[in-house]
Every structure is written in C-alpha cells, then in structure tokens.
Amino acid sequence: MNNAANAYARTAHSALTPREAESQLLLKAAQRLIGAGQALEAGENARLNEALSYNQRVWTLLSSEATADENPLPADVKQGVGRLGVFVLRSCVDTMIAPTPEKIATLVSINNHVAAGLQGNPG
C-alpha cells in the first residue's frame, strides 16, 4: 500500500504545471517557516535558520526564473517579482540576525499570497 501511495504522489507531483510547482514550493516554505516560528517561541532556534535558508533558495529560484530574459512575462511584472525577491531575501537575512514572530509572519504571508496568485486565487 505504501508503494502505491508513493507512486501516486510521484505521478501527481510530475503532473504539476510550472506555476503549480512554484506555488507548492512557496507553500512548503511557508509551512517550514510556521513550524520554525513555533519552535522559536518554544526556545528552539535551530529550525529557523534551516527554514529561512530554504525560503531563500525558493525565492532565488523563483525570482531568477521570473526575471530571465527568455521569460515572456511583461517587463513590469518581471521587475515587481525581482523587487519582491530582493525584499524577501533581505528579510530572511534580517530574520536570521534578529528573529521575531512578526518577521516570520510577514514572510509566511508573502509566500501564501504569491502562491495563491500562482494558483489563480489572488486576494
């Protein structure tokens, strides 16, 4: 049964569109940040840096792909994604240096909102 579930999960994952895959990565990063924020409140800092590093990798990939010359997005959208990416990357570093629940919540909110937009559910 476990093998069947794993096979289904691999098939479902490979059937994602690029936008769906990006959305899933952002949601996964948001969940990691939420878990790390809860651990931080319990006095554990170790998970936070790992979650922030993961979020940085996701945003580096997302902003690099969105701003690539061959990407057909309009220039203003590319510029907006690039600026948001820079903000997120700076916020991750700032949160590593001086973590607060508010900083973590901001990063989670950005990830969730961008993921919703990629899924066609802006708002």
Image (spheres, helix red, strand yellow):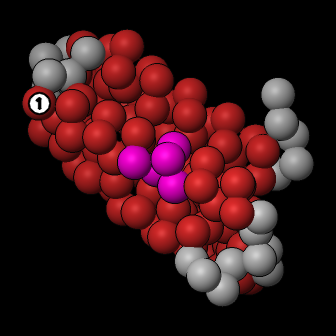
Nearest the eye: 50 or 102: 102
Query: Observer-nearest residue: 51 or 67?
Result: 67
Q: Main secondary structure of the magenta part?
A: helix
Q: Position of residue 57 (x, y in %)?
A: 36, 62
Instruction: Tell me what residue is drawn at x 45 percent, y 32 percent.
Output: 107
The x, y position of residue 70, in whole percent, is: 66, 86
At 71% from the left and 55% from the top, the residue drawn is 77
Magenta stretch, residue numbers: 82-86
Name the amino acid type tagged 1.
Ile
* Residue 56 makes an appearance in the image: yes
- Asked if 9 appears above or below 3 in the picture, the reply is above
**Left-right relation of 62 to 11:** left
Q: Quadrant of the C terminus?
A: top right
| Residue 85 picture location, percent across and down | 46, 50
User: Residue 61: within the magenta?
Assistant: no
Q: Residue furthest right?
A: 120
Q: Quadrant of residue 5?
A: bottom right
Left or right position of 55 against 42:
right
Quarter where residue 10 is shown: bottom right
